Each structure stands twice: as structure tokens, then as C-alpha cells.
Image (tube, helix red, strand yellow):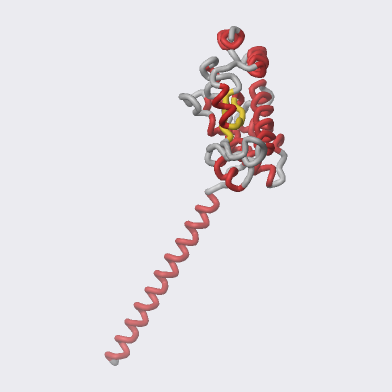
Amino acid sequence: MNAEWLKGAIRRSQNNSLKMAILLLVGLSINCCSHSAIGKKKTSAAEAIADLTDPAELATIKGEGTADPRLQKCVYWLAYAEEQGEMPEAVLDGAAKLNKTAGTPYTGFVRWGLLENLKIAKELGLLTPEGMAELRRGKSATITRGQYAGQEAEAGDVISESVCPELANQVMNLELLPASINQAKKDKVTDRARVFAKELYDAKLLSVEGWSRVEIR
């Protein structure tokens, strides 16, 4: 057997083996990427809001203002869903079913509050591309319309946390306000806060002690 021919055959064999190895690695890489894409399911607005307003989860968070980013994220998801052609009311219905609060007084208050805050966000001009990016991260968006333009829209308490600590972690107790108004409110109990507290108390979502603390202010 010719020695040169043998060397050539060996080289051809090695090249073929290398090609097969490369093809195998490419195939494995494509397969892994495909499975990764399948496994990474895109979060829907209803799923996001279900998590953000889940009472069981809210009960575990502590500290002043810890629920504020949740309101801002909820407003983002409602605005985003509406941009995609979904009805905000339908999104909230879906969220309530997912976190198993559908049909409860709690869901009624959450639904009303979030729809009101979406309306406020539109009126204050918060839903610009920049504002949406801030809201998605749970941050205060900048007001672009009206007399408070240039201020941030903060998440403020309807009933102050210092008056009713039990409402400190509740998204339903939050509203978007221009920073100057929110900071001026401090611990004041407004007429609206009294009405809201009575509604929560009647729905058994506010304790006797909580209602008393509002009533005597």
C-alpha cells in the first residue's frame, strides 16, 4: 500500500470526523435554544397583575411605601394591555381569577382603584414611552400635562399608613398624585378617606380599630 495514499486517507478521515463533530455541536446548540424559547413563556398583563395584587403575597411585605411600586407596575400593565387591544376590565377579571379573589369585595376595590389610577395616568400624561418605562420598573413617572407638569406622580395613600397601619401594604389604598400634593397631605384624613374607610369597614376589609382611628381624626 502506498504510504502517501495512506496519509491522505487518514487526513480525509480526520477532516470528516471534525465536520461531524461540528455539525453535532451546532445541532445541540439549536436544540437547546429551541427548548429555552419554548420554556420561557411571555408574561401576560393578567398574570402580572394577579401577582402584584395577590392578598397572600401582599400580606408578606413590610415597611412604609413597599406597595407603591406595585401600583405603578399595575398601571403599566393595564396601559400596555390596552395598547395591545385588550380591555382593562377584562384584564382585571382575568387577574382576579388567577389569584382566586374573583367575586370578593377585595377584588371590587382593587378593580375600581386600578381603573381610576389608569384614568389619572392618562390625564397627567404619564403614558409616554419614558413614563411607561418608569412605571414598568415600579418608579414614579413624570407628569407631562397640566399645571403639575414636570413633577413626578407619586403613589400616595388614600388613608395614611400612620392612621391605618393595616392598609400599609394594600394596592387598593393607593392613588397616583403629583408629588407636591402627596407631600402636602402627610397624615391628614380627607373627606374622601373617611368615605373610603367606611366602605372598607362595611366590606369587612378594615378592622373596628382601623375605622375608629379614621373616625376620630
Residue 168 relative to residue 13: left or right: right
The vertical placement of 137 against 29, above or below, is above
Classify residue 175 by image quadrant: top right
Q: Which residue is at a point 58% across and 34% down the rendered structure image?
A: 153
Q: Quadrant of the N terminus?
A: bottom left
Residue 169 % position (x, y): 53, 24
Query: Number of callouts in the render?
Result: 0
The residue nearer to you, when weighing 181 against 54, is 181
Single out the residue that lies furthest toward the left: 3
Residue 7: quarter of image: bottom left
Horizontal and vertical percent for residue 89? 71, 34
Horizontal side of 190 relative to 166 (left or right) equals: right
Q: Looking at this view, is 153 or 42 the one in front?
A: 153
The residue furthest front is 147
**Residue 102: where, in percent of width, then height?**
67, 27
**Res 120 → quadrant:** top right
Front residue of 72 and 3: 72
Residue 94 visible to an observer of this rendering: no
Image quarter (top left, top right, bottom left or bottom right) of the C terminus: top right
Task: Report whether residue 131 is seen.
Answer: yes
